[in-house]
Each structure stands twice: as C-alpha cells, then as structure tokens.
Image: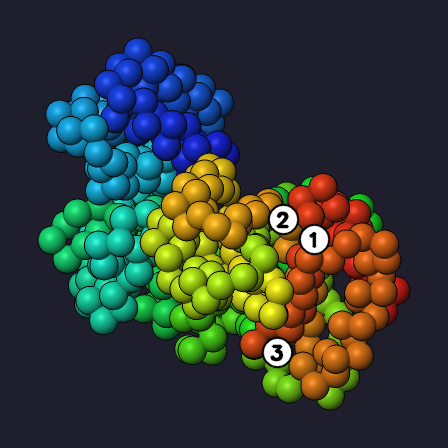
Amino acid sequence: MLVVSALDGVTDVLIEAAHLAQLGNQRGYRRIIANLRTRHLSLIDELPMGSTERAALQADIDRLLFDLLDIYHAMPQASGGRPMTGMVDATVGVGEKLSARIIAALLRQSQIRSVAIDTTSLIVTDDTHGFATPNLPLTRQLIDANLLPLVERGIVPVVTGFIGATSTGQPTTLGRGGSDYTASILGVCVRADEIWIWSDVDGMMTADPRDVPNTRVIPLLDYDEVAEMSYFGARVLHPRMIGPLRAEHIPVRVKNVFKPQQDGTLIKALGKSHTARLKAVTAISGITLSAERSSPTTTLPAMIEMSSPIATSVYADVIIAAQSSTRTLICYLIPTLAGPDALHTMQAALRELAAKVGDPPWEIQIVNIITVVGSNAAQWGSISTHLLDAVGDIPVTASAQGPSGFSFSIVVGGADGEAALQRIHETILNSA
C-alpha cells in the first residue's frame, strides 16, 4: 500500500488559488489551475507509458481540475465574503489526487495491478477543517470493507495523503504535511508490521540540513524523541503521526528515496536510557507577548484566556508562561503545519488584542524556539546548564524543560535563531 503527497509546492498554490477564488479573482485562480495542468501533463509526457494509458490519465486529470474550477467559481456566492474552510478543504487536497492517479497508472504500466483511492472514502474525521482528527473506529470499518479486499486480491492501493471526510461526506484535511499522518492511521487500521516514510533526506538528522551544515543521520530513535522533534519543527514527519503508532507498537523507518540502499532511521520503543544523550536540535518560529505587570487585570491566566481564540485559529500552543512581581511573559509556538502565513496572522491579531487591553502596553516579538531532544530526563538539569553556556552571549528570553522529559527549549530573538541553532548543534556533535 502506498500513501502519496502532492508534487512539491502544489498545496501552497492551491491554497493561494482558494484565497483568490473567495475574492472572486477568476483570472488569478484560472491561471494557477492552467499552470498546474501544464506541470502535471508535462510530467506524464516524460513517463514510460503507452498512449492509451496516457490519454486516460490526462482525461482523469482534466476532470479533477474542471471539478476544482467549479468549486472555485461557487466560492464567492457561497461565502458571502466569509472564509469557507469546508470548501477550501475540498480544493487543497486535489494535489494528492493528481499524484495518486499518476503513480497508480505508472505502476499499472509496470505490470503491477494498482488503483488510486481517495481517502475521502476511507478516513472519517471530525469537522475541524484544516486540522481534522480521524475517528479510528469508523475509519477501520471503512478500511476493512473497502481497502483490505483490494490488498487480498494482489492490488496495490495508491492512497491520497492529507485528506479525509466527515461522517456526512464533507471533505477535510489533516494539517500541512498530513500525508505522514495518513500513513500512520492506515498503518494502525491494517495492523502493519512497519511503516516506511520516503523523503529527500537520509533519515532523521541531528538538525535540519537546510539550516545547519555537518548534520548526521540518527540511526535509532524512540517514539517520544521523534514526537518532540516533529512538534518543535523537524519537517520530516507530521507532529501527530507518532501517537497512533506508539500506541500499537508499529515501527517507522525514514529513508531517502534517492538512496534506497541506506538504512535511514528506525523509530521504535527503546525503553528508558540510563545515560543522558543529546540527539538533535530543532528550530521553530514563535511569538512572545510580554508586559510590565502593574495591576491584577494583566495577570498571566487572564491574558492566556483572552488570547486563546487567536492561538486556536492558527493552531498555536502556549509552551512557556511565566510571571514575576514585575513582568508577565507568554510564549506561543507556531507549528509548521499551520502554514506560511500563520506567524504574521497571529502577530497582527495579538496587536489588536494588545490595543484593546490597553495599559500597561504589551510587547509582541517574533522569536525562535530552539529545542534540544534527547534521552534520560533525570540528567537534563546539568545538561541544560551546558546548553545555555553554549549559547554564549546570545540573549535568552526564556527556557524550559519539556514536560515529556525528552526536550529542553531555549527562546531567543528572531535575529539570533540561526546562531543559537549552530552553536547548540556543535554541542550535540561534540557530546556524541
């Protein structure tokens, strides 16, 4: 069984097209769809398949894109100027549908029986559009009825990642990068022996190789370590995919699609370690909200409660909250699955909130949250001191050990994030 994502960048342009459609900008979204059609048809032309299969595939892609245009055309009338998250979810998963059909056709051309399946007919979710949560019992029923019989007949299902549907059939999405989460859900439901994630990196690394030189592959990781890495910004895996697999003890292997001979990283339950070991460092964007505390109305719980609707709208989490006799600080993590505009959306909303609250003035700052992940929480006390020393002269806004016991986070200004990440990564390599 294969779970596929959209081609690189396709989801981003589909989101852009949906925004243009809501504004009634037909020229804008039609141009995007025309470019997507050209890109996918050009890919098909390069693949080794017969003329009959190619023509059928091109017709299938055109049908998907024409259906997409119909949804875009209806958006301004349906929304009345309001965001239509349900209709947006119905459009942004089309990239996965296109990929699934191309890969299934290529497999058939290679004499492998295969069929593309949209997970709108397999994964049942709640109605939280953009960040839906699967209903495992209902999903398992559909998989048992519609997916496993294909596998038993020797047919390879090519399944769309990222998307699902409510119990009434309304399309939903699982959050950015949700194809890994789809693989996790399907793996649990079919009782898989192991799940393989194919990426463009050699496995889970000591840091993001796009940001840090001299990174190394981590051959073996615990579920909890990977969960922390994903939550705090490692972009290889979806933050929510580990939970279901950990519960069912299903191992995960992360491999490089361009280097299949390499082992990659194996993720499984490792048990408690008696030796502290730093394994990786991640970086993710965040926002701090702080003020001089001079009256009871600016207490920490009150401000968290007032900002909660804002944080919820972009799926942000409060990871550090502190209050002294003179100052209050709240630090929000902006998850990678929230999308590229979430940081600035939340920043603007917090500015509006701060203006309403009034005196004393609240300061809003974009920050970087640098998180070290490792084993043996009992020894994090001495290690955290070592990590703060490694940061050196970079001002630290806040720091905290994660409640899971597998992480330690340092909050620095946005301009200092790269330097702090580099210094801490060197510390990890030297401690290996």
- Relative horizontal placement of residue 276, taking residue 293 as reference (left or right): right
Most distant residue in the top direction? 27
Q: Residue at x 54, y 66 (%)?
A: 321
From mark 2 to mark 3, how far is it between C-alphas? Answer: 23 Å
Task: Tell me if mark 3 has few (under 14), some (14-19) or many (20+) residues whose alpha carbon lies within 10 angstroms of its own.
Answer: some
From mark 1 to mark 3, how far is it between C-alphas? Answer: 21 Å
Dot placed on the residue nearer the N-terminal end, 1 or 3: 3
Q: Are marks 2 and 1 in contact (CB under 8 Å)?
A: yes
- Relative horizontal placement of residue 104, taking residue 227 as reference (left or right): left
x, y percentage for residue 290? 57, 55
From mark 2 to mark 1, how far is it between C-alphas? Answer: 6 Å
Dot placed on the residue nearer the N-terminal end, 2 or 1: 2
> Looking at the rendered structure, which numbered label has been put on residue 234?
none
x, y percentage for residue 332? 52, 56
Q: Which residue is mark 2?
A: 367
x, y percentage for residue 256? 62, 49
Q: Which of the 4 image quarters holds residue 407?
A: bottom right
Residue 18 visible in image? yes
Element under label 1?
Answer: strand
Q: Which residue is mark 3?
A: 405
The kind of residue tagged 2 is Val
Q: Which residue is mark 1?
A: 412
Dot placed on the residue nearer the N-terminal end, 2 or 3: 2
The kind of residue tagged 3 is Gly
Q: Which of the 4 image quarters holds residue 389?
A: bottom right
Viewer-side label of 2, 3 = 2
Q: Are marks 2 and 3 in contact (CB under 8 Å)?
A: no
